[in-house]
């Protein structure tokens, strides 16, 4: 008779132990990703790296644009001087 009254308690304890084991086996029970501060620092580092890449690309684009404008300006001056030398009138 005494064994029958403790069955629900044993079953309940078994459920609690199974739940605890399942929780410990899952990743959110372990610090896989480090602390919150480490995750934020890693994210900030990634953002800074990407922003540096974007700034480098933007600078390259600006430098290329300036070089293209200078090249166009040089070609206009060259054409002007050749026409002036050959005394060709432009309309």
Image (cartoon, rainbow, N blue to C red):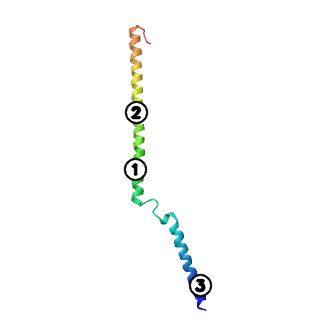
Up-down relation of residue 69 to residue 33 (above or below) = above
Element assignment for label 3: helix
Q: Residues within 10 Å of mark 3 (few under 14, many from 20)?
A: few
**Quarter of the rendering occupied by the C terminus:** top left
In the image, 44 versus 88, the foreground residue is 44
Element assignment for label 1: helix
List the single residue furthest toward the top: 87
Q: Residues within 10 Å of mark 1 (few under 14, many from 20)?
A: few
Label 3 or label 1, whichever comes before in sequence order: 3
Up-down relation of residue 15 to residue 38 (above or below) = below
- Residue 66: quadrant of the picture: top left
**Residue at the image point whose x is 41% and y is 60% from the top:** 36
In the image, 61 versus 17, the foreground residue is 17
Q: Nearer the viewer, mark 3 or mark 1?
A: 3
Label 2 or label 1, whichever comes before in sequence order: 1
Q: Position of residue 47 (x, y in %)?
A: 42, 48
**Quarter of the rendering occupied by the N terminus:** bottom right
Up-down relation of residue 44 to residue 66 (above or below) = below
Q: Residues within 10 Å of mark 2 (few under 14, many from 20)?
A: few
Residue 9 relative to residue 48: left or right:
right
Give the distance between the C-alpha atoms of the residues marked 3 and 1, in whole angstroms. Answer: 56 Å
Q: Which residue is mark 2?
A: 62
Give the distance between the C-alpha atoms of the residues marked 3 and 2, in whole angstroms. Answer: 78 Å
Label 3 or label 2, whichever comes before in sequence order: 3
Q: Which mark is residue 45?
A: 1
Element assignment for label 2: helix
Q: Which mark is residue 7?
A: 3
């Amino acid at each position: 008779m005494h064994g029958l009254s403790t069955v629900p308690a044993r079953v309940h304890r078994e459920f609690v132990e199974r739940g605890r084991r399942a929780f410990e086996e899952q990743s959110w029970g372990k610090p896989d990703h480090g602390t919150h501060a480490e995750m934020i620092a890693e994210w900030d580092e990634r953002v800074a790296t990407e922003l540096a890449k974007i700034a480098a690309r933007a600078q390259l684009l600006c430098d290329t644009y300036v070089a293209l404008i200078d090249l166009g300006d040089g070609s206009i001056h060259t054409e002007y001087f050749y026409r002036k030398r050959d005394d060709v009138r432009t309309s």
